[in-house]
Image: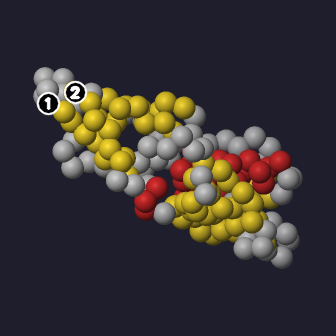
C-alpha cells in the first residue's frame, strides 16, 4: 500500500492511502467551520487546530489582541485622539498564522466591538481602511481622513 503523509506540526502527521497518485483533500477547519479542502504535497505543511480564534480588547495596551487557543497571533492597535475617537493605526498577524483569514477576523471582531460600544473609528492602518471599504460593520461610526474619504465614497469598479 502506498501512503501519503501530511505534517500537522508538533511532530505529528496524518497518513492515508494514496489514490492513484492523487492526494485526497484534507478538510481545513477555520473560523466558521469547514472552509476549504487542503490538497497536500510532498513538502507541504499545515497546522490543523480546532481552536477558534478569539479577539479581546486590551485597553492597557490600546489594542485588540488576537489569540488562537492560548497563543498570541496578532493585534490591531489604536490610540485615542483629542476627541476620544479610536484611531486604528496598525494591524499585525504573526506570519505563522498567515493565509487563514485571521486578519479579517481580527478586524471584523474589533470593529464590531467598537460599534457595540458606540465609539467612533478613524481608520489609518491600510488594512483597516481596506477592510472598511469592502465590508459593512453595522452601527459603526467612521470618520475618514480627507484622503481616505474620497476613496471610500467612490463607487467600486465593476469586477471582470
Secondary structure found at label 1 = loop
Q: Nearer the viewer, residue 115 or 124?
A: 115
143 or 67, which lies in front? Answer: 67
- The residue carrying mark 2 is 17
Q: Position of residue 105 (x, y in %)?
A: 59, 47
| Residue 113 visible in the displayed image | yes
Looking at the picture, does residue 69 appear above or below residue 83?
Answer: above
Is residue 160 positioned above or below 121 on the image? above
Question: Residue 42, how many percent across, how many down?
Answer: 19, 45
Label 1 to label 2: alpha-carbon separation: 6 Å
Task: Name the spot of residue 46 as percent of width and height, x first.
Answer: 36, 47
Is there CB contact under 8 Å for labels 1 and 2?
A: yes
Q: Residue at x 38, y 52 (%)?
A: 9
Where does label 1 land, which residue?
2
Which residue is at the front of the view, 31 or 139? 31
Q: Nearer the viewer, residue 69 or 12?
A: 12
Q: Residues within 10 Å of mark 1 (few under 14, many from 20)?
A: few
Residue farthest to the bottom, as pictured: 82
Q: Which mark is residue 36?
A: none
The answer to which quarter of the image holds residue 51 is top right
| Colour pattern | secondary structure
* Residue at (54% x, 64% y) in the render: 92
In this rendering, the answer to whether 103 lies above or below 6 is: below
Amino acid at each position: 500500500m502506498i501512503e501519503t503523509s501530511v505534517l500537522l506540526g508538533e511532530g505529528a502527521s496524518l497518513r492515508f492511502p494514496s489514490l492513484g497518485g492523487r492526494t485526497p483533500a484534507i478538510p481545513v477547519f477555520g473560523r466558521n467551520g469547514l472552509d476549504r479542502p487542503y490538497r497536500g504535497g510532498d513538502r507541504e505543511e499545515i497546522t490543523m487546530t480546532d481552536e477558534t480564534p478569539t479577539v479581546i480588547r486590551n485597553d492597557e495596551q490600546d489594542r485588540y489582541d488576537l489569540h488562537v487557543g492560548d497563543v498570541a497571533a496578532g493585534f490591531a492597535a489604536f490610540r485615542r485622539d483629542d476627541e476620544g475617537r479610536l484611531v486604528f493605526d496598525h494591524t499585525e498577524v504573526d506570519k505563522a498564522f498567515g493565509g487563514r483569514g485571521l486578519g479579517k477576523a481580527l478586524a471584523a471582531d474589533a470593529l464590531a466591538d467598537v460599534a457595540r460600544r458606540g465609539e467612533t473609528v478613524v481608520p489609518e492602518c491600510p488594512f483597516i481602511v481596506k477592510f472598511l471599504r469592502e465590508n459593512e460593520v453595522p452601527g459603526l461610526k467612521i470618520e475618514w481622513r480627507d484622503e481616505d474619504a474620497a476613496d471610500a465614497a467612490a463607487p467600486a469598479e465593476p469586477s471582470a
